[in-house]
Every structure is written in structure tokens, then in C-alpha cells.
Image (cartoon, grey):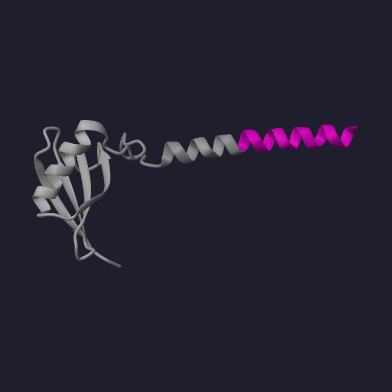
Amino acid sequence: MKISRTLIVIAGAAVVLGAAGAGVAVASSGSDSTEGPDVAISGDALQKASAAALASTGGGRVTETEIHDEESYYQVEVTLDDGSQVDVQLDETFHVVGSKAESGD
């Protein structure tokens, strides 16, 4: 009986320490900003952001999106026909405010 009580106490302590560690990891990821997890653009905003990004790159296909990116309000990743990728930065009104070609590794 003493062994199973000890195991229960140890297991409970492990759960508490694991949860505390996860909380520290979440709190420390992005400690210099209030940025949360990546959230994809959806609905009507996705259509508008995609159209603006594709117009800016001259074609390609949208492969990833993000709202409230660290660089702009919307970010749209476009993969061009040659396989290269461009991150297009948009403001709240879907105007292009910048873009950056991704370098292949």
C-alpha cells in the first residue's frame, strides 16, 4: 500500500511539474512581443488578401496565410511557377506594404 501511495504522489508531482514547464514554454515563446500563435486568414479576407498578393507577384498560388504577422497585418505566401516563394505583406485594407523572396536552402 505504501508503494502505490508513493507512486501516486510521484505521478501527481510529475503532472504538476510538466504543466508548469509547458506554461513557461508558452510564456517565453515570443517574450519580446504580444504575438500569439499563427492564425490563417479566412473568409472574405482570404479572398481579398490572396487576390492582392497574386496581383503583386504576377501569378503563382497561395500556399500559406497569416493574420497579424510580426511585419504586417496580413502575410500571404505565394509559390511561383518556378517553385520560389514570396511573402507578401498587406495592411488592413489589403494594400501591399512589402514583399520578400524566400531564399532556398
Q: Is 4 one of the magenta-colored residues?
A: yes
Residue visible at 9% across and 50% down? Answer: 56
Looking at the image, residue 43 lies above or below residue 64: above
Left or right of residue 64, residue 58 in this image: left
Instruction: Count numbered badges in the picture.
Output: 0
Quadrant of the rendered image containing residue 41: top left
Quadrant of the rendered image containing residue 7: top right
Q: Is 47 one of the magenta-colored residues?
A: no
Residue visible at 81% across and 35% down? Answer: 6
Left or right of residue 98, residue 41 in this image: right
Looking at the image, residue 68 lies above or below residue 62: above
> In the depicted view, which residue is nearer to us: 90 or 22?
90
Give the residue at the far right of this rendering.
Answer: 1
Assign the C terminus to one quadrant of the image.
Answer: bottom left
Give the residue at the far bottom of this rendering.
Answer: 105
Residue segment shown in magenta: 1-17
Quadrant of the rendered image containing residue 86: bottom left
> In the depicted view, which residue is nearer to us: 78 or 67?
78
Magenta: main secondary structure equals: helix
Horizontal and vertical percent position of residue 68: 25, 36
Residue visible at 67% across and 38% down? Answer: 14
Assign the N terminus to one quadrant of the image.
Answer: top right
Looking at the image, residue 32 lies above or below residue 5: below
Horizontal and vertical percent position of residue 10: 74, 37
Horizontal and vertical percent position of residue 36: 35, 36
